[in-house]
Image: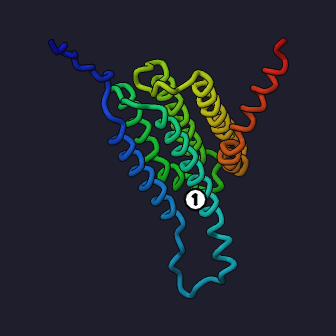
Amino acid sequence: MVESVAPVSPPSGFSKNRIEALTDGIFAIAMTLLVLGIEVPQLFPLIPLNRLFESLFPDIIHYVISFLALAVIWVLHHQQFHYIRFIDHTLLWLNIVWLMLVGLVPFSTSLADTYTGIKFANIPFAINILLISLLLIAQWQHAVKNRHLTIPELTKETTIMERNRNVAILTITFFGSVLAFISIVEGIFIYLLIPVFFGIFPRIDRHIKDRIVRKKP
């Protein structure tokens, strides 16, 4: 007699592939639109090349910082989704609102670029990046709280490391927001710490854990 095997029901949620494709597409568009903020003035007679580069320098700085910030945020999202198997409706809408804010980055960058020299012009960009970072943490916290959404191999150690890295990036963006009220230059350049910190964070995290282990009796 052949025993009937009951089908195993899949975990609640749906495939992450389409949201990953949507994310990649929106990031590609947002990062491409940033370069449109670097406008070469169509003036005749042409101004000297050195004066042209001087006039375009703020545009280029805003472009580089915004591009690097988006690149790091995309990598963080990509790493998070490496540990996620399924998407539920809450995670889906968190991601959609997050992508809406990502799509605003070219606008907030252009605003800061157009009104260079005005102290509060950089605030929308700072708040934009800050909200993106907050929602990135919210997505990760929701996923790890609902373990059926993540891969079985996800360890507690990795969960904590990813959370700490996101919090660290959020801290940098917070100080960028605060400094933007005081000085535009410092408020902008602090975002250059994001890719630097992102690269060295695993080493810092490993060093802290080693010190904790050595202190244990």
Q: Which is more toward the observer, 80 or 25?
A: 80
Q: Give the quadrant of the N terminus.
A: top left
> In the rendered image, which residue does mark 1 sit on?
63
Picture residue at 63% right of the left edge, 37% below the top: 169
Horizontal arrangement in the rendering, residue 134 relative to residue 117 (left or right): left
Q: Name the quadrant of the C terminus.
A: top right
Figure quadrant of residue 198: top right
Q: Which one is in front, 4 or 110?
A: 4
Residue 109 pos. (x, y %): 54, 52
Residue sitting at 56 percent across and 45 percent down? 125
> Residue lying furthest front in this view?
1
> What residue occupies the far bottom of the structure in this picture?
45
SS of the residue under disc 1: helix
172 horizontally vs 214: left or right: left
**Residue type indicated by callout 1:** Tyr
Picture colour scheme: rainbow
Work out whether residue 37 or residue 150 is closer to the camera in this orientation and state it.
150
Give the vertical position of 158 relative to 114 (above or below).
above
Above/below status of 138 relative to 19: above
Q: Callout 1: 10 Å neighbours few (<14), some, many (20+)?
A: many
Q: Residue at x 68, y 77 (%)?
A: 51
Find residue 81 and report its horizontal and vertical position in percent: 46, 36
Relative to 111, say whether 50 is above or below: below
Q: Determine whether, in the image, residue 139 is placed left or right of residue 114.
A: left
In this view, the residue in front, 166 or 158, is 158
- Res 90 seen here: yes
Query: Residue 48 is drawn in which quadrant?
Result: bottom right
In percent of the image, x 70 and y 42: which residue is there? 197
Answer yes or no: is residue 184 visible: no
Q: Position of residue 14 (x, y in %)?
A: 30, 30
